[in-house]
Amino acid sequence: MKLTNEQQRSIDRRTQINSLAFLLFTLFLSVCFFAAVPLAIRLTALSKEGFYNGLIRILTGPSKLVTDYFALGGLAPTLFNAGICGLACNLFLIFSRVKADSITFAAYILVIAHCFYGLNFVNMWFPFIGVVIYCIIKKRPLRQNLHTAMFSTALAPFISDLLFFYPLGDNLRVFGVSIAGLILSIAFGVFAGFLVPALLPGTTAMHRGYNLYKAGLALGMLGIFVYCFLYKTLGLLPHNTIVEEGATYEAMSGFHYLFMNLFFALLFFLTLLLGFFLNGRSFKNYRKLLSCTGHGIDFADQFGMPLCFINFGLYGFCILLYLNVVFFLPTVFPSLPEGVGFTGPTAGVVFAAMTFSADGQHPKNVAPIALGYSILFVIVCLICTVAGLPIPWTLSTQAYINGLAFATGLCPFAGSYGFRYGVIAGLVSAIICTSTAGMHGGFVLYNGGFNAGLTALILIPILDFYNIKPRREETVEDIEIPGISFKRRRKKSNRTQVND
């Protein structure tokens, strides 16, 4: 359909609004972290020296999964780390003049998510700059590959280990940095910069877009190769993750719970309010968004950023509610093992679960995935009770909180194949979520996305073999966006019979 000049101007105007809203929102998130730092310092009675030492511990400590930055450096230094890493990405977004899209939004959210457990302002740069070098040499515009640069930071734990702990040239150090490790880090960054852009399209094709955390499978596979070479092949032992347990951190656990609940509740409310006002003071078209399968649809492009903000806020409240329920399961059922509360990794995966809220995730298609985790938990409880075995985990065990956050990327199974297949996807993901980190030694921060990718690789061939087809494809409806003078077409919906 040929567009009129007026319609084209409307599209251009909408694109400009989306880009501006995207840039302002990501900057807003970074500012939120900085704004929370003084309050965290005051409420934890943290001295200036304590803040500095905590930040140094985060920047120079090991960062394998799952390093709790709240325990390692403290609440305020962790928030500052998230703010400064987010701000650095904001500057790249602004100066590269990147076009606002859902995949760049997702990459930014994942950066700040992992700033709570494994990513910091030191170890993020080598893989990031590696992709920049790739763009320069291959003459590719950075603005079209900025999301790849941000995704590559998932390999940051390798950098921390190479710089500070890798046992090669151990006796030659400057300010605690191994010279041999620095050379290896530079080489690793360039190596990753050229391989990550090559791996992403191929691994996405493998799972056909049914795992929204597309980079997880690619980076997980690359991480296995690097880990095996650096450690297994050479017979070296990686440095253990630092686990801080003590009276101070335990005493602050209740504070962390209250602080992070208030932080997220305020963030989600303000985002929801922003979307509401930008959407013409309404929730118009949000029901249409909820009817989407989540497979192969860009919410930002189809509905505009205001509705994405509404989805971010409402979906965020659902994630927060789920966490608060599972936190109290051991209290309600004393026979269950103790879980965790708002640790650094827990706070981080709240953001991680929101990654594709502009590109396929919404409460309706994520709910079956969460139900799959819950069903596996009930099955384990029944088996252990009958067999007289202790229950090994609960839904608030850290590995299962992290696992579910990324398993939400399997939501296209629920949207396309139906509710029960979404439940099955969640259940399969829950079964393997505690085993995948061992494959790459915990050096890939996107372990949950890797797990979701493996789940998709298991399910897709089975569904194909038994000729089980998607029940729906994305509906083609005209969407009326406030402030836009025409309706946009989408692919027409079609339902096919599922062979049970």
Image (spheres, helix red, strand yellow):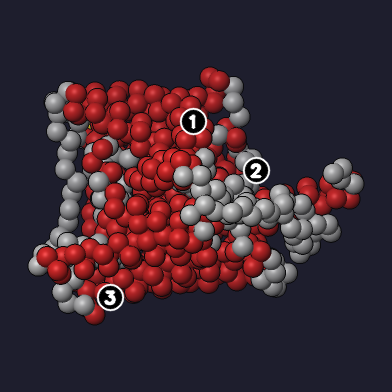
Q: Which of the numbered marks, if any, corresponds to residue 120?
A: none
Residue in the image at 89% along x and 50% along y: 6
- Disc 2 marks which amino acid? Lys
Q: Quadrant of residue 17?
A: bottom right
Quadrant the N terminus occupies: top right
Left or right, residue 149 beside residue 140: left
Residue at 52% in and 58% down: 418
Q: Amino acid at mark 3?
A: Phe
Where disc 2 sits, the SS reads: loop
Image point (27%, 43%), residue name: 437
Identify the element where label 3 is drawn. loop
**Label 2 to label 3, Cα distance in Å?**
43 Å
Residue annotated with mark 2: 99
Q: Nearer the viewer, mark 2 or mark 1?
A: 1
Which quadrant holds residue 98? Answer: top right
Query: Farthest residue in the top direction?
Result: 137
- Mark 3 highlights which residue? 328
Q: Position of residue 116 (x, y in %)?
A: 34, 54
Amino acid on which disc 1 is placed: Gly
Asked if disc 2 and disc 3 are in contact, CB closer than 8 Å, the reply is no
N-terminal label among 3 and 1: 1
Label annotation for residue 202: 1
- For the residues labelled 2 and 1, the Cα–Cα distance comes to 24 Å
